[in-house]
Image: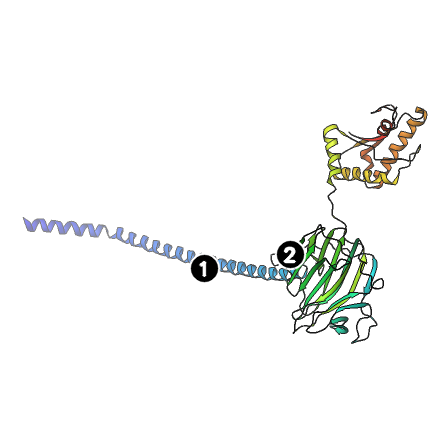
Amino acid sequence: MKKTALLAIILVLATATASGQSILNRLKDRAKDAVERNIGDKIEKGVDDLLSGKKKDKDKRNAAQEDQDTEEAAAVEQQDGQKKGKTAKGEEMKSDFVPGTVVIFEDDLTGEKMGEFPSKWDLIENNAEVARMNGKMAIKFEHGSSTSITPLIKDGNKKYLPEVYTLEFDFFAGNNACYNLYLRTEDNYVSSRIWVGLNNMSWSIAKPGEGEVEGNKDIDDIMDLNDWNHFALSFNKRALKAYVNGKRIINVPNARAMDWFTVDTEFWEDHVDYITNIRLAKGAVDLYERNEQSMTAIEKAIAETGKFVTNNILFETGKAVLKPESMEEIQKVADYMKKNPQARFEVQGHTDNQGSDKVNDPLSQQRAEAVVKALEDLGVDPFNLRSVGKGSHEPVADNKTDEGRARNRRVEFIKK
């Protein structure tokens, strides 16, 4: 029984093996194809990955190069910026200096004799002499001493600084260079001091009455070491500004007016100081004053009432000729209209009741036209202007009094 069963099992297996041989062969073929396809896919993927990797490496190299180029460009820009008066942080420094036009004192040392005391100057302390430095004739301050000099102006009169002026000179930034500009009162009791060194500028500016304004600023990014540099001072009634190489360092809005000045050097054993091209002249940077109040009055009047009425545009008696003092008010209107180019105005001329309508009606029309012409001359688009004469027909006050008649003589700008 056991042998028979065993024999049956062997026969079944043999039959299955024989009949399944073709199936196994087909499976082997399919496996082979699958392996080849898999290898092909892997090769293709490998090539793609290789190309992609090269692209990524190329992109990385390009990005790195761009970063390097950007850094180099930034470095160049920073150097250029520093030469142009930018701080290390890229902050643009102001440059609004305007030299005076009427020269009071000027000295470039031309014609001076080497080794002599400069002929246009007076000595206050120690010694100075004419010398040549880096291609320029200059005043050389004595080595190892505190020297002070002042220009010879008006026979030594110590009251020559005008109400508005600029003062300039070139200074050499050598080793441990140190320059002091003192602005002094006539009695030499009160003074403002500006100190310029190789990498710093400090100041103590006297205020009207009592007190002073002190400060300091790093300026090594705008100075040229071992070369000539330019200092400039601007004073306008009360506003004091100072510059190095054209870049504004000091801006004091309310400083005390002074009478005369000295240029001093401090005591250093290992340095020699030089100045040249000294120039003092009347005129300066315009005094900064906000001019918004009048403009705000125009804007407010137009916003609230749709018109601006003024008694400050004046004419010659019985004529349509504008008085010169009228131009200040007309300029304000012109500024408003240029700031608001879409605004259109009817310019109305009004008179008092002195005289007949036969005279006042055409006169008011002519005066309105004169205002329009003045606005056109100031750059206002004439398309936005229309002149109308109202004569004395629309009074705003009693014509029986001088005050009332003055109010009735007016110009109105009616917004359309």
| Image location (x, y in percent) of residue 318 | 93, 32
Please state if 4 lies on the left or on the right of 168 as rendered: left
Q: Nearer the viewer, residue 146 or 346?
A: 146
Whether 329 is drawn above or below 247: the answer is: above
Q: Nearer the viewer, residue 342 or 65?
A: 342
| Image location (x, y in percent) of residue 225 | 66, 68
Mark 1 or mark 2: name the one nearer the start of the chain: 1
Q: Residue 215 shows which numbered tag?
A: 2
Q: Residue 50 shows which numbered tag?
A: 1
- What type is the residue that disc 2 sits on? Gly
Q: SS at mark 2? A: strand
The residues bearing labels 1 and 2 have C-alpha atoms spaced at a distance of 64 Å
| Image location (x, y in percent) of residue 276 | 76, 67
Which quarter of the figure has residue 351? top right
Q: Nearer the viewer, residue 204 or 42?
A: 204
- What type is the residue that disc 1 sits on? Leu
Task: Answer yes or no: is residue 410 visible.
Answer: yes
Task: Answer yes or no: is residue 388 visible.
Answer: no
